[in-house]
Image (cartoon, coloured by chain):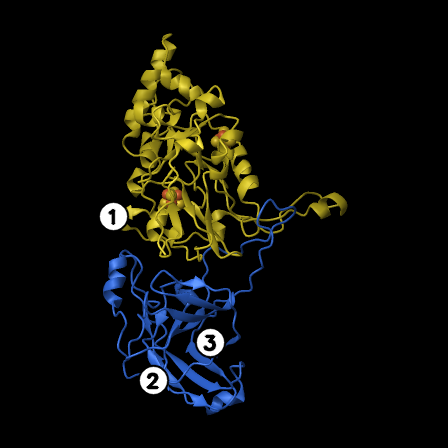
């Protein structure tokens, strides 16, 4: 375990599915050669296939302390990358802009498809980055000790010098949040914007988010909003806790989405989406979390003051982000093997 | 899971088995695997073994390549090693060289695939002359007995690597001459090494991309003394 742990909380009730975060990350970190198909931050529609396709069924993580086997997603699982015939459309008289190849899959291919329940469609968005896990399976699987967890803030990084592109980490990560750059022969992943944090600025995905759904800070800092939401009020949960990696990205589950004719009713008394699906994503504890959130909502609706809801509104950057000063973090180099 | 590997391979600095690789001396080798000079060189057949699974949860993979044929020519201050083995599918590719790493303008070069692995082979030699029949550990040498690895990868070419124990393999950036052909379900590859003295132990590794081989997931031979 690292001395401190950076963490992100995302309130799924507020995500617009606008992909601004995806683009902020893409432009910041993954627009180099060989990185075309990579989205270190992606937003997928749930229920849905996810990105890469069916990642949640591929395996990885731990099973009673042992790494669980998994395949490596194919490029098509991630979604194809393609160009349009803009030349022909703009100057050659083509009737419409068409992709150069038949497109069978893209990230968020099934956008807004969702599923049906009691004849009504439901879906929500799930933005995902690397979880900078406390027990990273990727790190455990790397035979070259190329992956390390920073002692000072818990950020998980791949040493690009040591990495040989063996991809055991991609198999081991149950969230499939490591990507292979075939041209470089290196595995690459979300770096939690550590160069920005070190300058006192927040992650690009969080900074650009128009839904203001993201909260960033040290999980172990009692003054941070992430600490309050996760540890004090206990209203945010990690994805797939049973995968055994102890993720440090937490989600406030969707708890009160509207449905025709049931305004004001709790999701527990009249569900707008199957609770089983939320349990599948976040574990049994999600039921308790929803209860807590609804209790807070009742307080606010009856004119009281709910600290949880005030925090979740995330009025300004001061509420949402508490970036540690460099001096606050004890700068210890992680123990590394030769 | 590491202990499993350790258990299977803690041979440490092993004593030489009476296994040898024949060599022809006093002629100049040919990088061309089909070169006429190779016809007159006696071939040694080295049994290949499969490394155990990397994870306890991963099933062992099949022994699809039972042996590798080795021919060696020593002369003119060099040693040519020609390796041949059957492999019905050639896993090879020509990869674009990445140029723009950062904030590039215009179109980027694309990763064509995420899950393919390429065929390859290597000859491992002790980095220092061996004494008293003490050979380095087969697991990429050990701290006291470092090794040199002449590595060929069907997508990235040849490169010298150094290692002093498992997980310590380092690219040196030094290239060396090598030429490979795949035809009729067989790989034949000639590696041009600096002079290797008679009596030096060598071991051979083969990676079969089709079996997702890379790193320690591979075929290997035990040490054989070069004649
Ligand atoms: S989410 Fe995956 S890549 Fe990120 S730290 Fe956890 S196991 Fe490693
Ligand atoms: S920018 Fe914010 S609101 Fe938009 S998709 Fe990303 S997380 Fe959701």
First-in-chain label (2 vs 3) = 2
Element type where label 3 sits in the image? strand
Q: Residue at x 48, y 48 (%)?
A: A78
Q: Position of residue A99 (x, y in %)?
A: 62, 47
Q: Colour of chain B?
A: blue
Chain letter for yellow, please: A
Q: Nearer the viewer, residue B52 or A116?
A: B52
Q: Is residue A161 left or right of residue B101?
A: left
Q: Which residue is mark 1?
A: A65
Q: Is residue A312 left or right of residue B109?
A: left
Mark 1 → mark 2, Cα distance in angstroms: 43 Å
Q: Is residue B37 left or right of residue A235?
A: right
Kindly identify which chain the residue marked by label 1 belongs to.
Answer: A
Numbered disc in front, either 3 or 1 = 1
Location of the N terminus of chain A (image quadrant): top left
Disc 3 residue crowd, few under 14, some 14–19, many 20+, Cα 10 Å: many
Q: Which residue is mark 3?
A: B187
Disc 2 residue crowd, few under 14, some 14–19, many 20+, Cα 10 Å: some
Work out whether A308 lies above or below A182: above
Badge 2 and badge 3 in a common chain: yes
Q: Is mark 2 within 8 Å of ligand 1?
A: no
Mark 3 → mark 1, Cα distance in angstroms: 40 Å
Work out whether B94 lies above or below A266: below
User: What label does residue B20 carry, if any?
Assistant: 2
């Amino acid at each position: 375990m690292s001395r401190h742990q950076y963490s992100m909380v995302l309130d799924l009730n507020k995500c617009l599915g606008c992909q601004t975060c995806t683009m902020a990350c893409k432009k910041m970190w993954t627009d180099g050669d060989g990185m075309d198909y990579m989205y270190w931050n992606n937003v997928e529609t749930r229920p849905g296939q996810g990105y890469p396709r069916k990642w949640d069924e591929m395996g990885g993580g731990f099973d009673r302390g042992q790494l669980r086997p998994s395949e490596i997603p194919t490029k098509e699982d991630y979604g194809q990358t393609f160009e349009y015939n803009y030349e022909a459309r703009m100057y050659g008289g083509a009737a419409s802009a068409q992709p150069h190849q038949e497109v069978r899959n893209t990230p968020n291919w099934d956008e807004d498809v969702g599923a049906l329940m009691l004849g009504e469609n439901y879906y929500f968005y799930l933005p995902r980055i690397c979880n900078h896990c406390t027990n990273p399976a990727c790190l455990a699987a790397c035979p070259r000790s190329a992956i390390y967890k920073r002692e000072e803030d818990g950020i998980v990084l791949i040493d690009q010098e040591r990495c040989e592109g063996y991809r055991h980490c991609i198999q081991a990560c149950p969230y499939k949040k490591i990507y292979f750059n075939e041209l470089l022969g290196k595995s690459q992943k979300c770096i939690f914007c550590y160069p920005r944090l070190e300058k006192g600025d927040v992650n690009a995905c969080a900074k650009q988010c128009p839904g203001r759904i993201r909260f960033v800070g040290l999980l172990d800092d009692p003054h941070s909003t992430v600490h309050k939401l996760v540890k004090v009020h206990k209203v945010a949960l990690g994805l797939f806790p049973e995968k055994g990696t102890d993720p440090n990205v937490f989600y406030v589950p969707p708890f009160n989405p509207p449905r025709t004719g049931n305004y004001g009713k709790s999701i527990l008394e009249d569900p707008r989406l199957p609770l089983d699906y939320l349990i599948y994503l976040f574990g049994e504890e999600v039921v308790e979390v929803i209860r807590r959130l609804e209790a807070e909502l009742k307080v606010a609706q009856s004119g009281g003051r709910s600290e949880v809801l005030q925090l979740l509104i995330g009025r300004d950057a001061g509420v949402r982000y508490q970036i540690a000063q460099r001096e606050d973090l004890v700068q210890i180099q992680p123990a590394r093997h030769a | 899971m590491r202990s499993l590997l350790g258990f299977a391979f803690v041979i440490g600095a092993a004593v030489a088995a009476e296994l040898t690789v024949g060599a022809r001396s006093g002629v100049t080798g040919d990088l061309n695997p089909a070169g006429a000079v190779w016809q007159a060189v006696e071939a040694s057949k080295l049994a290949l073994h499969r490394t155990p699974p990397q994870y306890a949860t991963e099933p062992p993979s099949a022994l699809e390549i039972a042996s590798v044929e080795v021919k060696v020519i020593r002369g003119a201050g060099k040693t040519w090693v020609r390796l041949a083995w059957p492999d019905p599918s050639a896993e090879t590719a020509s990869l674009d060289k990445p140029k723009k790493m950062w904030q590039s303008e215009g179109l980027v070069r694309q990763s064509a695939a995420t899950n393919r692995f390429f065929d390859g082979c290597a000859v491992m030699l002790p980095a220092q002359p061996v004494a008293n029949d003490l050979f380095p550990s087969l697991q990429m040498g050990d701290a006291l007995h470092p090794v040199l690895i002449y590595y060929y990868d069907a997508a990235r070419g040849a490169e010298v690597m150094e290692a002093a124990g498992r997980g310590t393999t380092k690219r040196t950036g030094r290239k060396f001459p090598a030429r490979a052909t795949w035809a009729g379900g067989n790989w034949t590859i000639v590696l041009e090494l600096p002079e290797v003295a008679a009596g030096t132990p060598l071991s051979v590794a083969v990676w079969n991309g089709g079996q997702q081989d890379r790193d320690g997931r591979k075929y290997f031979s035990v040490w054989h003394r070069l004649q």
